[in-house]
Image (tube, helix red, strand yellow):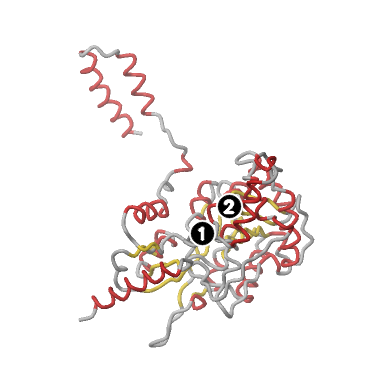
Amino acid sequence: MFRNVAAIYLHLAGLLQRKKAGTSLTRCLHQTFAMAKRLQARRLDGIDHNPWVEFSKMASEYDVVNLGQGFPDFPPPDFAVQAFQLALSSDFMLNQYTKAFGYPPLTEILASFFGKLLGQEIDPLKNVLVTVGAYGALFTAFQALVDEGDEVIIMEPFFDCYEPMTLMAGGRPVFVTMKPSPTQDGELDSASNWQLDPTELASKFTSRTKALVFNTPNNPLGKVFSKAELELVASLCQQHDVICISDEVYQWLVYDGHQHISIASLPGMWERTLTIGSAGKSFSATGWKVGWALGPDRLMKHLRTVHQNTVYHCPTQAQVSRAHRGKLSVPQRQGLPCCGAVLRCGLPPPQGLAAIPVSIFYSMPHRKHFDHYVRFCFVKDESTLQAMDEKLQRWKDELRP
């Protein structure tokens, strides 16, 4: 407040000088007090920085091999592209609005497909919401279910949007950290080595806890949570009557030898879980922005309220392309990392190679403990990976004494 008063005082002094030059004092006073008024909403405080915007800008400005942002640099599957082309060129009415909560053939397919996976009778009208990407599903969930003062448990490392979305909804993020288990000399680290401390996790639940955000497979680690870990989280959510927001956009991209399990499929969890999915991640078409939320009507009805009063409707043709031929086809990919790999290094990556520092996936107090890790995204064309290999080999040679 005192800073604002001082600023106005100094500005008024300048106005008196300008008055001598013939400027209208009334006009200048109006401009002064208009400028002193706060412009941005308080819910935006502290969340204006976005690392993806910054790193994408730098990667585009310089000649680098970009293994930073998690998008493929190869075409989507032929059947997906052909389906989109057909949606663009067939029925002209597909250029118009479809149902607000999802193109009916797509919601029916999602209900049938995921109903089998989750062991539920899913109603396409009550239990499915198609959103502008999984990002849109997450934002809608936080706005619909998190209230002023609610606590939201977030497991670190976490996809960076969880924290600002919690804050924008008026909630308070509560962090619990996964830590890597010690490895033997010469043993390679693995995503499965990163573990939650069950006692620490349990200690984060309070009477104010409203939701827990769960991400499996995890970005940035690629960790696929085991059934035992899922059962621990499920038990605590049920014990404390907490909603689980389960981000499962990478469910089809898992390491060999691991199996993805949806936490909503565990006993007692369907009624308190929102399952978030993404066609963009599954079909290597991130720009199409087709995502969804699945869950019980007691939760979904509130997401529909937010959706109808914000975006209202998602692009029809992108939804049609995902419903082509009346089924949801999932590409088969073997041995492909979830999004990338987290590597420990004592030196910064070589020049000309873009990566993401893993520290951005942690809350501010914990970043210093993980600033020696970087994340590479390997969902790239063979030529990109070859260029990466050449830079790493050159870097290795330069480091030799």
**Residue 23's spot in the image, x, y percent?**
26, 14
- Tell me, yes or no, whether the two marked residues, 1 and 2, touch with CB atoms within 8 Å: no
Q: Quadrant of residue 307?
A: top right
* Element assignment for label 1: strand
Rounded to the nearest whole Å, what is the CA distance between mark 1 and mark 2? 25 Å
Sort mark 2 into few (<14), some (14-19) or many (20+) by Cα contacts within 10 Å: many
Q: Which residue is mark 2?
A: 133
Q: Which residue is mark 1?
A: 174
Q: Nearer the viewer, residue 128 or 235?
A: 128
Residue type at mark 1? Answer: Val
Residue type at mark 2? Answer: Gly
- Up/down of 35 relative to 272, above or below: above
- State left or right for residue 120 relative to residue 318: right
Image disc number at residue 297 = none
- State left or right for residue 15 relative to residue 118: left
Q: Quadrant of the N terminus?
A: top left
